[in-house]
Image (cartoon, coloured by chain):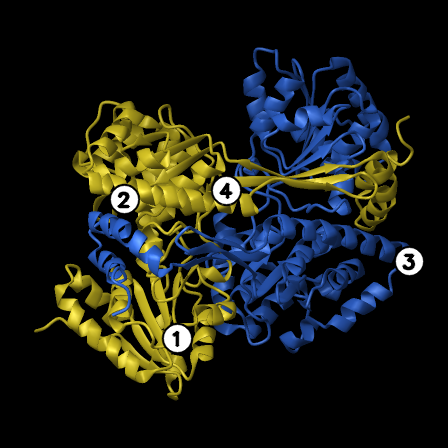
Chain colours: A blue, B yellow
Amino acid sequence: MTLQATPLRLATSAPDFEAAFKARLHWAADTDAAIEQRVADILADVQQRGDAAVLEYTRRFDGLEADSLAALALDPAELKAAFDALPDAQRNALEAAARRVRSYHEAQKKASGESWSYRDEDGTLLGQKVTPLDRVGIYVPGGKAAYPSSVLMNAIPAHVAGVGEIVMVVPTPRGEKNPLVLAAAHVAGVTRAFTIGGAQAVAALAYGTATVPAVDKITGPGNAYVAAAKRRVFGTVGIDMIAGPSEILVLADGSTPPDWVAMDLFSQAEHDELAQSILLCPDAAYIDAVQREIDRLLPAMPRREIIAASLNGRGALIHTRDMEEACAISNRIAPEHLEVSSREPQRWEPLLKHAGAIFLGAFTSESLGDYCAGPNHVLPTSGTARFSSPLGVYDFQKRSSLIEVSEAGARALGPIAAELAYGEGLQAHARAAELRLEGRP
Amino acid sequence: MTLQATPLRLATSAPDFEAAFKARLHWAADTDAAIEQRVADILADVQQRGDAAVLEYTRRFDGLEADSLAALALDPAELKAAFDALPDAQRNALEAAARRVRSYHEAQKKASGESWSYRDEDGTLLGQKVTPLDRVGIYVPGGKAAYPSSVLMNAIPAHVAGVGEIVMVVPTPRGEKNPLVLAAAHVAGVTRAFTIGGAQAVAALAYGTATVPAVDKITGPGNAYVAAAKRRVFGTVGIDMIAGPSEILVLADGSTPPDWVAMDLFSQAEHDELAQSILLCPDAAYIDAVQREIDRLLPAMPRREIIAASLNGRGALIHTRDMEEACAISNRIAPEHLEVSSREPQRWEPLLKHAGAIFLGAFTSESLGDYCAGPNHVLPTSGTARFSSPLGVYDFQKRSSLIEVSEAGARALGPIAAELAYGEGLQAHARAAELRLEGRP
């Protein structure tokens, strides 16, 4: 039987649209009680036994033997050697991508990550001091989903933020190292690396062991064990969002070559069977053309089985009444990746309120953004773009409020604070403000 | 027996300092399995039965009867009436505090919360669009910890961010409303309010019911049930940090009147028995003087029992070798509130890396910041200032990356993206980039 990829065809004008649309969007992160319990046990064990526990789990889960955790450390020279040994084309591409990602995040830091302060009319200073985190951990998955681009996207913002130490962990099942991942770590400014993974690596980073230093925040994707471990150590350390399946939404006015759009839908679908690719378009004939391109292009794709499973199971081609309605539906979805494949992307952009990243115009394929346009490819999934943001320099900084009340300011503010403090029944708060009213004794 | 408040006296030069210091700092948020289970049940019930479940729990836990959830809504007119009925002094203080908090957060938005973009040499546009959340929920505790200042500190940043709808929930046990809380909601720009609380209110905000609209993020403090509920709905909605006990650290050079410092330590200790007040000072005689002021001032404090329990159980007066060492210890603690009670606060400020808010100079009592200096009083506790920030306008905004690749840009970026995508085995990504190389067909 020929492999077919046929995303669900919907039309907003159909009476059953709402129910079918909701059903297709539905995705719930299952929490597996068995995984939760095993992760809790691993965390407790690493917290108690440190290096010995990490070594034991690494042996058991990754089939990797070592006498000590220090033997699983990768020093900067080894990372550099991996970089130097790459073929020229890969080395140059990695460097070019890193340069662009760095330059974008430097602009981001300048636009929104600098300290600020002002003085009010009483000479009181108010502001915020922005400082980098001292030490962060970057989790990099091993095996089939070992993406060097993820190393760049996690480590470079941390490096630009000025983080003192960037510790990477990456599992290497049976000792097999991915040279592109090590090379990316070199380019991105990773300080130290350990070939450990899973919940045991998250535990080592969160609590620290004799060999692995405790970090202040852990970012980076991972499997269900890693996600569960990150959730559990949240509070002891900071974490980034827990990612769901990747998604693309293409908002098309019909002016982009349909094979370009078909390939963009594929490029999301090829990630995994749960990935979601959706097209919104007011032109039914164009949707037909995209489906024809899907049929034509699929057989040549090496990952066609995954693409077909994803498009058949979760994909959708939605015919809308007009572009305005397409924008409104996009806002309901709050997609991770949003392509505005239109001749007039700037016309629609102001209508788009919720999305991880917005790719404007036919030339802006998501894949350019995934690797090298500059912006981060770690983006909020599963509708969380309603309330969260791309990974950025700000995730590796924190803010401290600065207040220096002048003597005149203390006289002006004291009565206000005291009135409110008495109203809340907090008399020491009130008295502390009142003591400053008369100046130094 | 006379009530005594005697914080633990430590000296960094003592051989047992490290152990005693660590023991005093130790605080672990217990997770209570019984609470967890009850909260999970309440969330599931509200998700399924909506209004009816919320009404039932409100009857059971708050002793408040109502025919419908709509009957528990407070309309804007009722909030305004509460404000208008306040005594002049309270109304003026509330307005003055709100004005200053608003003006600080407007400066914050301008400094770090505006959209930005630039074009690179190929004409490719890169940037970030910053937009407000559509709708947020503010949890306000009822009963003894009903603080109108918390309403201001949670709602004003949301209002300044441009959030479309700010929904407040506040439990009113047996129907008893706190007029200052209602008045603060009016001043702060709350859109709608419901007199519900506990896990059931968090569930209503996260999932939505027929009467309570689903929000995108929930902020605000609460008891153990509220905290557990917020943790569980995280992902469906955004949440702020889960707060631990409040803390103050005073870094003193001995130049501030010792009664001012004693009262500042009280003003943290009076919150609750678990609150932590610590003094770091290189001058032993000054520490003695502060202890004498504690003894002298305590009997007159209405909340002296709580203050004594907090200072005896968790307080510390620490003699350091010098101010530099005091700064280093402060960085290890990463306190929520940090007073630099020195003649030279600007000399020490650059050494201070981790703190929620830094109060510079003798006139800057923490209580002025708590109520009306302008900066937010919702701050990271329990050492989480190592990686997190005060509540701010940024918590009510999210960012979308903007990318518009020009035709020339697509030619420059395509080969880089393709090289890396092939390296990762993601051929559709590579093909999507390559299709753009030749321009439109």
Counting labels gives: 4
Mark 4 or 2: in front is 2
Q: Tell me the quadrant of the picture where the N terminus of chain A can be found.
A: top right
Identify the mark at residue B22; answer none if there is no mark: 1
Mark 1 or 2: in front is 2
Residue B226 percent across, percent down from the top left: 34, 45
Identify the mark at residue B93; answer none if there is no mark: 2
Whole-Å distance between the Cαs marked 1 and 4? 34 Å
Q: Secondary structure at mark 3?
A: helix
**Which residue position is annotated with label 4?**
B235
Cβ atoms at labels 2 and 3 below 8 Å apart: no
**Which residue position is annotated with label 3?**
A88
Identify the mark at residue A377; answer none if there is no mark: none
Is the residue at mark 3 from the same chain as the one at mark 1?
no
Cβ atoms at labels 1 and 2 below 8 Å apart: no
Is the residue marked by circle 1 packed among few (<14), some (14-19), or many (20+) residues within 10 Å?
A: few
